[in-house]
Amino acid sequence: MIEIERKFLVTSDAYKKQAITKTNIAQGYLSKHPERNVRIRIKGERAYITIKGASNSSGTSRFEWEKEIELEEGQSLLSLCERPIIAKYRYEVKSGNHLFEVDEFLDDNQGLVIAEVELTHEDETFVKPNWLGKEVTGDPRYYNSQLSNIPFSKWFT
């Protein structure tokens, strides 16, 4: 139940042509405590509840527990979440032996595109697509829970 991932900014929209899926996501937070958060996500026609712990010092690893729930339950729980709700498109892109999840944010976070790759261990190597930019692993500004507090659109005002 340990999630190991690295995050990167995306420098072009070339990932869209390489994507094998595109899904609409809405997610909100029932709790955003610094040591843990509880997230509700509607991904297409499926719903999930996720609990994430605090990240390690590098920001690469943290506890994650996720369970699929009924769509109607997810919609009801999403209505209880703190505002704003994060809205984004998720593209899945294969690169070598890995799958990158590229999130194109909408609404107050429009203009932000982040790619994540999940790993089996922190030192694992992977093929970096040419549209991958600066690594932002461990930068809390790019955590979805923080983007709901301080949206990307407010970073430069």
Image (spheres, helix red, strand yellow):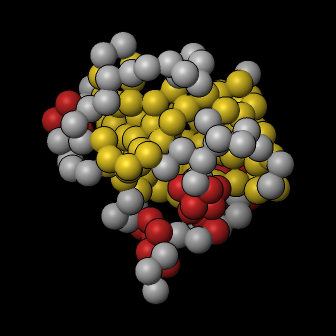
Q: Quadrant of residue 84?
A: bottom right
**Where does the image place residue 93, in percent across and percent down from the top left?**
31, 28
Q: Quadrant of residue 121?
A: top right
Q: From the viewer's perspective, is 152 left or right of 75?
A: left
Q: Nearer the viewer, residue 16 or 7?
A: 7
**Where does the image place residue 141, in percent across and percent down from the top left?**
57, 61
**Where does the image place residue 123, in percent across and percent down from the top left?**
55, 22
Q: From the viewer's perspective, is 112 left or right of 131?
A: right
Residue drawn at 72 percent across, 42 percent down: 57
Spot the residue most to the top.
97
Number of disc labels: 0
Q: From the viewer's perspective, is 74 left or right of 114?
A: right
Question: In the rendered view of the protein, which quadrant contains the N terminus?
Answer: top right
Spot the residue most to the bottom.
157
Q: Quadrant of residue 105?
A: bottom left
Asked whether the viewer can see residue 118, the reply is: yes
Residue drawn at 44 percent across, 46 percent down: 135
* 139 vs 21: above or below: below
Residue drawn at 59 percent across, 71 percent down: 150
Residue drawn at 45 percent across, 37 percent down: 116
* 28 vs 100: above or below: below
Asked whether the viewer can see residue 70, the reply is: no
**Where does the image place residue 50, in percent across and percent down from the top left?**
70, 37
Q: Nearer the viewer, residue 97 or 51?
A: 97
